[in-house]
């Protein structure tokens, strides 16, 4: 739904900003690491301007979220809106939809059914996965601060998708085999947050390891499959 994705990113931000001004309250934008596109530097600091393809299948989200950040800036400059912006890196945990198509939900649900694990590309692309509780802690720290520029939130520990697949198979005790499929267009090769800024604002950094977080998430998906 690329048109809806693009318009929701921009018009949603616009409506939230207008509402915040009307009610004289702060407004927090949940931005994304996608603003960095397929980054040429690692880890990514907030000052990195990104490498986004503005004319491709990911552009609706990447550019939509970039435009939303710009709109937050404009509302602060022009109308003195009380803004916060967090750039959220890959997040996972209980509460995810089993069919959202993201890698953690796909791999766990495939493993629990002993179906083939679908690795896209050679599986050597990396992501840094942050457990949802750590994300929420960090969002509250930024929200309660006076910092009004974008802040990265994520877990800087980087894994390849092959490592993730192996970890999921190990935790679930699955007999699934790893299979390889084409890499989607413009899929970033690497992604890792620099969280120095978030820490300087008062976040202690992530507490939950990928192993522990995946165990909790597997438990959640198992219960969901069993209709609990
Ligand atoms: N991916 C994969 N198998 C899947 C789903 C995703 O190998 O079944 C890969 C995808 O190509 C990407 C990474 O996992 O390199 C993370 O994908 P996701 O959609 O979860 O997040 P994003 O690409 O937005 O970081």
Image (tube, rainbow, N blue to C red):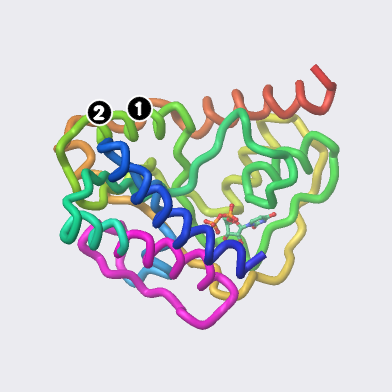
Quadrant in the picture for the N terminus = bottom right
Q: Residue at x 78, y 43 (%)?
A: 110
Give the left or right position of residue 90, taking residue 196 as reference.
Answer: right
CB contact under 8 Å: marks 1 and 2: yes
Q: Residue at x 27, y 69 (%)?
A: 49
Residue 120 rendering spot, x and y as whole percentages: 67, 63
For discs 1 and 2, the disc positioned in front in the rendered view: 1
Q: Residue at x 49, y 57 (%)?
A: 126
Give the left or right position of residue 107, taking residue 94 as reference.
Answer: right
Mark 1 or mark 2: whose residue is earlier in sequence: 1
* Most foreground residue, 167 or 198: 198
Determine the main secondary structure of the stretch shown in magenta: loop
Q: Which mark is residue 137?
A: 1
Give the left or right position of residue 219, taking residue 19 as reference.
Answer: right
Give the left or right position of residue 117, taking residue 28 as reference.
Answer: right
Residue 66 covered by magenta stretch: yes
Which residue range is magenta in the image? 41-70
């Amino acid at each position: 739904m690329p048109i809806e994705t693009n318009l929701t990113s921009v018009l949603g931000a616009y409506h939230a900003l207008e509402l915040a001004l009307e009610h004289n309250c702060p407004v927090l934008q949940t931005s994304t690491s996608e603003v960095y596109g397929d980054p040429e530097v690692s880890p990514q600091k907030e000052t990195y301007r990104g490498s986004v393809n503005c004319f491709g299948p990911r552009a609706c989200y990447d550019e939509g979220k970039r435009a939303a950040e710009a709109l937050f800036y404009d509302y602060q400059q022009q109308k003195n809106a009380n803004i916060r912006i967090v750039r959220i890196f890959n997040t996972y945990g209980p509460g995810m939809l089993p069919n959202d198509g993201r890698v953690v939900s796909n791999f766990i649900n495939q493993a629990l059914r002993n179906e083939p694990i679908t690795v896209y590309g050679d599986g050597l692309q990396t992501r840094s996965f942050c457990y949802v509780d750590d994300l929420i802690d960090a969002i509250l720290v930024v929200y309660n601060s006076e910092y009004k520029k974008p802040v990265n939130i994520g877990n800087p520990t980087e894994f390849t998708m092959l490592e993730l697949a192996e970890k999921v198979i190990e935790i679930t005790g699955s007999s699934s085999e790893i299979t390889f499929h084409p890499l989607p267009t413009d899929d970033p090769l690497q992604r890792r947050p620099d969280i120095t800024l978030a820490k300087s604002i008062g976040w202690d950094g992530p507490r939950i390891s990928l192993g522990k977080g995946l165990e909790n998430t597997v438990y959640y998906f198992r219960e969901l499959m069993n209709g609990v």
